[in-house]
Image (cartoon, helix red, strand yellow):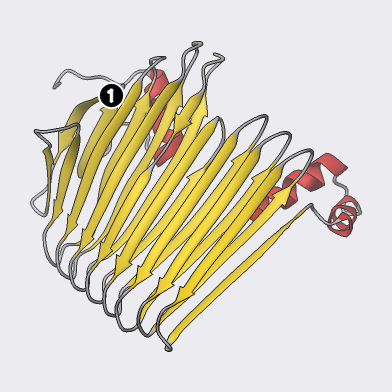
């Protein structure tokens, strides 16, 4: 794969999902059309292809600081059904960024599907910022489907912050995230989704707060327009002295639909769990206020939505 070269469509997708202008530097694994096409490692970060199934193992040495691992996926062939298994092993007191994302370009009539199954194992004191964008484009009628599964295991005082964004063009997605947290561990999830047409999006979070002083903060912001539908399910189990806060804020317009289903279980007298949900249309006074500043109604609505999803 040494002679692999990026095409223009590849570059456009990489820019959209990972803010990359080409092949990244440092540690990275680039996947295209269901195949691993290029891998690079550093002295502190090793990436090894799995032998028993598609995917990679990423090993970050203890005390590694300031490095980024890029693992973007691009799909440009119609009818691809890609499933990949990636495992991340983050050493004690390491502090790294993982830049992921998947972009699908589909000009055909067949469904294109990517399913990334990620498992995170963070040792004591390890810290990870995980960035993931999903994006679809193309002139074809074939559906662009992304179904990520994430499994998180956090050791003592470890922390993982996940920022996931569905930009546009994804016809169907089912996102499942689960986690178990040790003493003093922290899991923060920031989700942003926008759907159009007849698109559907489902997200399900399930977190076990097992450790003393463990914490989770889950925030979902979404906009459902036209005839699209979204479903948000959150499950937080407080099994020790812990804190959990789940917040779902959604804007609906046209014939969009959003369902939010909370489940918080306090299994310890010292568990402190909160769930908040707010779903509704844009307030008329907000639009009027912006229109007095010279914006059209359509421009005002777009500005409000853009600010809401930032």
Residue appearing at x 89%, y 50% in the figure: 291
The residue sitting at the top extreme is 108
Whether residue 58 sits left or right of residue 98 in the image: it is: left
**Residue located at (40% from left, 84% from top):** 268
Residue 304 at what x, y percent from top left? Answer: 74, 52
Residue 170 visible in the displayed image: no
Along the line of sight, the residue nearer the viewer: 219 or 105? 219
Q: Is 134 placed left or right of 184 in the picture?
A: right
Looking at the image, which is closer to me, 248 or 241? 241
Q: Quadrant of residue 63?
A: bottom left
- x and y percent of residue 23 in the render? 28, 32
Q: Choose top left, top right, bottom left or bottom right for residue 152.
A: bottom left
User: Which residue shows up at 29% across the image and 78% down it?
Assistant: 211
**Is residue 294 rendered to the left or right of residue 267?**
right
Q: Residue lying farthest bottom?
A: 269
Callout 1 secondary element: loop
Q: Quadrant of the C terminus?
A: bottom right
* In front of the other: 299 or 161: 161
The residue nearer to you, when weighing 51 against 160, is: 51
Q: Quadrant of the N terminus?
A: top left
Question: Residue 201, can we see it?
Answer: yes
Where residue 70 appears, as percent x and y from the top left, is 28, 43
Give the answer, above or below, for where 76 lies relative to 120.
above
In the image, residue 38 sits, relative to residue 262, either above or below, namely above
- Residue 204 lies, in percent from the top left, at 47, 52
Label 1 CA crowd tier, 10 Å (few <14, some 14–19, many 20+): some
| Residue at image mark 1 | 34
The tally of labels here is: 1
Residue drawn 17% across and 18% down? 3
Taking 32 as reference, is 41 above or below it? below
């Amino acid at each position: 794969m040494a002679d692999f070269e990026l095409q223009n469509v590849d570059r456009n997708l990489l820019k959209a999902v990972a803010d990359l202008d080409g092949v990244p530097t440092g540690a990275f694994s680039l996947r295209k059309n269901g195949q691993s096409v290029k891998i690079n490692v550093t002295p502190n970060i090793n990436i090894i292809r799995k032998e028993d199934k598609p995917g990679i193992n990423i090993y970050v040495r203890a005390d590694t600081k300031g490095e980024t691992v890029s693992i973007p996926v691009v799909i440009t062939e119609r009818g691809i059904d890609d499933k990949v298994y990636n495992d991340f092993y983050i050493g004690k007191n390491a502090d790294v960024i993982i830049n992921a994302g998947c972009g699908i370009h589909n000009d055909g009539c067949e469904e294109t599907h990517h399913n990334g199954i990620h498992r995170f194992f963070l040792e004591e004191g390890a810290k990870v910022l995980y960035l993931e964008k999903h994006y679809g484009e193309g002139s074809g009628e074939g559906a662009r489907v992304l179904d990520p599964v994430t499994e998180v295991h956090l050791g003592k005082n470890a922390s993982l912050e996940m920022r996931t964004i569905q930009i546009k063009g994804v016809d169907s997605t089912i996102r499942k995230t689960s986690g178990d947290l040790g003493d003093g561990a922290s899991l923060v999830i920031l989700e942003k989704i926008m759907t159009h047409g007849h698109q559907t999006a489902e997200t399900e979070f399930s977190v076990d707060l097992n450790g003393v002083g463990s914490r989770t903060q889950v925030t979902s912001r979404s906009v459902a327009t036209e005839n699209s539908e979204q479903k948000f399910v959150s499950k937080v189990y407080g099994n020790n002295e812990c804190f959990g806060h789940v917040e779902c804020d959604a804007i609906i317009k046209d014939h969009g639909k959003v369902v939010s289903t909370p489940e918080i279980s306090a299994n310890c007298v010292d568990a402190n769990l909160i769930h908040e949900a707010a779903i509704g249309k844009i307030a008329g006074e907000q639009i009027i206020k912006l229109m007095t500043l010279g914006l059209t109604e359509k421009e005002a609505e777009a500005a409000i939505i853009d600010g809401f999803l930032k």
